[in-house]
Image (tube, rainbow, N blue to C red):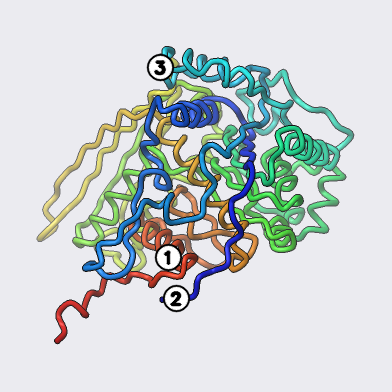
C-alpha cells in the first residue's frame, strides 16, 4: 500500500459560490436540490455515479467514488453567487428552459430562496450583455474587496465552514497576458489603478484566491491563468483549475481524436459548427468574445494529434470552428462536425457527427464535481495551492505551469484523475501493465 495522505474531514457546510447564475448555475443548483429530494439522479457526475478500481483486477474492489473519497455530501452544500440580473434561481431556471417546468415547480420554494448578489460587471468585456444589477466602486480593488466582504457575509449568514467558487459566467473578450499580470505587486497596483487588462473574471479570481477559497474557471477567459494569481494561490494555499468546461462538441473531439491517433489514421480536415440560442450564444455572437472561445476550441486537436511528430498524418490538418447564435434553440445546442480522414495508401474517408446536446445539462455535473474535488484538494495538505492539473478532465483548455503542454486526451486525463484519487487515499496506482497475471 502507498502512503495515505492526511485529509481533513469534510465537516460542516460547504458554500458553493458561482459568479453568474444563469443557465449553467441554475441548472446545477436546481439539479442538486432535486437529487437531494430523490426526484432525479446525478447523471453525468463522476463523483456521484462513477466507480474507481482499486488493487488487482482479481480483487474486484470498485467502490463508488463518493464512498471512496472523503467528499462533502450533497446535503452539506449551500448555494449562492452573483449575477447581473436580480432573478432568483427559480426565475433564472425557468427562463433558461433547461429543466422541465414540472420539476422546477416541485422545488420552487428552495430555488426562490437563493438570490444573487450584485455582480462585478463591465460591458466593455462582454459587449452583448447589459447588466442592471451591478456593483460600483472607486476602483477595481474596491470591487474585489466588496466581493470578499460578500463571501464573508455569505459564509457567516449560512453557517458555512468552507467555500469554493466556480465561474459560471459569460465568455469575455479575448485577452493576452501583459505586464500587469506578471507578479502580484504589479497586479494589485493594477487593481488600484483599474487597469484595463484586468477584466471582471480576474477580479473574482483574485478575491477568491486572496481569501484562500478554491477557484475553478468554467469559461475560456484568462481569469486566474496569470503568474500574479498563481503566485497568490501558492501564498494562500488556494487550489485553482480551468479553463472552459468540456461539454459538447469539444468533449467528442477529445474522444474521437485519440482514437484516430491510436490507430494511426490521418486527418485532413475537421470542420465544426454550432448553433445555440441561450445567453452564451448571444455573448459569443460578438467577435471579440468568440475569439476567446475559438482559441479554446482550436487548441484541442493540435495538442492531441501532435502534427510535429506525425507530419504525414496531421501536418496539413485544416481545422475550422464556427459558433452561430440562433435564438429558437435556446440551451439546446447542436454541434455538427465534418471530419475528413484518410487511411491505408492515403484513401479518403469521412465521418459526420451531429450532436444535439443540452449545454447546461452537460455542464451542471461538472460544476458539482469541481466544487467537491476542489474542496477535497483544499483539505489535503499534500496538494499545494495553485494549479490542480489532475482536474484537467473537466476542461477544454487545461491550465498547466509555464512551459508544460496541457494533456487533452480524455482517457489520459481520466487516468491521471483516478490515479491522483488513489494516491490521496494510499492505494496503489494502476498502470494497466498486468504482467503479474501471466507470471509464474
Quadrant location of the N terminus in the rendered image: bottom left
Cα gap from disc 2 to disc 3, whole angstroms: 46 Å
Cα gap from disc 3 to disc 1, whole angstroms: 38 Å
Which structural element holds mark 1? helix
- Which residue does the image show at 56% across and 17% down from the upper left? 90
- Which residue does the image show at 54% across and 61% down from the upper left? 400
Which structural element holds mark 3? loop
Question: Quarter of the image holding residue 247?
Answer: top left
Q: Is residue 93 above or below residue 52?
A: above
Front residue (pair 3, 343): 3
Front residue (pair 361, 434): 434
- Which residue does the image show at 60% across and 39% down from the upper left? 167
The answer to whether residue 337 of the structure is visible from this angle is: yes
Q: Which residue is mark 2?
A: 2
**First along the sequence among labels 3 and 1:** 3
Q: How many marks?
A: 3
Q: Which residue is mark 3?
A: 100
Packing grade of label 1 (10 A; few <14, some 14-19, many >=20) is many
* Left or right position of 283 against 158: left
Residue 85 locus on image (x, y percent): 66, 19
Q: Is residue 354 above or below residue 148?
A: above
Question: Quarter of the image holding residue 99?
Answer: top left
Residue 392 locus on image (x, y percent): 47, 55
**First along the sequence among labels 1 and 2:** 2
Q: Is residue 9 above or below residue 132?
A: below
Cα gap from disc 1 to disc 2, whole angstroms: 9 Å
Q: Which residue is mark 1?
A: 422
Which structural element holds mark 2? loop
Amino acid at each position: 500500500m502507498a502512503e495515505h495522505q492526511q485529509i481533513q474531514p469534510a465537516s460542516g457546510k460547504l458554500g458553493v459560490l458561482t459568479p453568474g447564475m444563469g443557465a449553467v448555475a441554475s441548472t446545477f443548483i436546481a439539479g442538486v436540490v432535486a437529487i437531494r429530494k430523490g426526484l432525479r439522479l446525478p447523471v453525468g457526475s463522476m463523483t456521484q455515479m462513477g466507480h474507481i478500481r482499486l488493487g488487482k483486477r482479481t480483487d474486484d474492489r470498485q467502490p463508488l467514488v463518493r464512498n471512496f473519497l472523503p467528499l462533502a455530501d450533497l446535503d452539506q452544500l449551500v448555494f449562492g453567487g452573483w449575477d447581473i440580473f436580480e432573478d432568483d434561481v427559480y426565475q433564472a431556471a425557468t427562463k433558461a428552459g433547461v429543466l422541465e417546468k414540472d420539476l422546477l415547480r416541485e422545488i420552487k420554494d428552495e430555488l426562490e430562496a437563493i438570490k444573487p448578489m450584485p455582480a462585478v460587471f463591465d460591458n466593455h468585456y462582454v459587449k452583448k450583455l447589459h447588466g442592471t444589477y451591478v456593483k460600483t466602486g472607486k476602483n477595481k480593488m474596491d470591487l474585489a474587496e466588496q466581493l470578499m466582504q460578500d463571501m464573508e457575509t455569505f459564509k457567516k449568514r449560512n453557517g458555512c465552514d468552507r467555500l469554493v467558487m466556480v465561474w459560471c459566467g459569460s465568455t469575455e473578450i479575448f485577452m493576452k497576458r501583459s505586464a500587469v499580470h506578471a507578479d502580484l505587486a504589479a497586479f494589485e497596483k493594477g487593481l488600484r489603478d483599474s487597469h484595463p487588462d484586468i477584466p471582471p473574471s480576474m477580479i473574482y479570481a483574485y478575491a477568491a484566491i486572496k481569501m484562500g477559497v478554491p477557484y475553478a474557471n468554467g469559461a475560456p477567459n484568462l481569469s486566474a491563468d496569470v503568474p500574479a494569481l498563481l503566485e497568490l494561490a501558492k501564498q494562500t494555499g488556494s487550489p485553482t483549475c480551468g479553463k472552459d468546461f468540456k461539454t459538447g462538441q469539444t468533449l467528442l473531439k477529445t474522444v474521437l481524436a485519440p482514437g484516430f491517433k491510436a490507430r494511426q489514421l490521418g486527418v485532413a480536415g475537421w470542420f465544426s459548427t454550432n448553433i445555440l440560442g441561450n445567453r452564451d450564444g448571444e455573448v459569443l455572437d460578438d467577435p471579440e468574445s468568440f475569439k476567446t472561445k475559438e482559441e479554446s476550441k482550436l487548441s484541442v486537436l493540435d495538442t492531441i494529434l501532435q502534427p510535429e511528430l506525425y507530419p504525414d498524418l496531421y501536418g496539413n490538418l485544416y481545422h475550422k470552428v464556427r459558433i452561430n447564435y440562433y435564438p429558437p434553440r435556446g440551451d439546446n445546442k447542436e454541434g455538427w462536425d465534418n471530419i475528413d480522414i484518410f487511411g491505408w495508401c492515403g484513401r479518403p474517408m469521412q465521418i459526420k457527427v451531429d450532436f444535439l446536446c443540452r449545454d447546461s445539462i452537460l455542464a451542471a455535473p461538472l460544476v458539482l464535481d469541481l466544487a467537491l474535488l476542489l474542496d477535497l484538494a483544499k483539505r489535503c495538505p499534500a496538494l499545494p495551492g495553485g494549479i490542480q492539473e489532475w482536474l484537467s478532465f473537466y476542461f477544454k483548455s487545461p491550465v498547466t505551469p509555464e512551459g508544460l503542454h496541457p494533456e487533452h486526451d480524455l482517457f489520459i486525463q481520466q487516468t491521471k484523475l483516478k490515479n491522483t484519487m488513489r494516491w490521496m487515499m494510499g492505494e496503489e496506482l494502476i498502470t494497466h501493465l498486468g504482467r503479474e497475471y501471466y507470471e509464474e
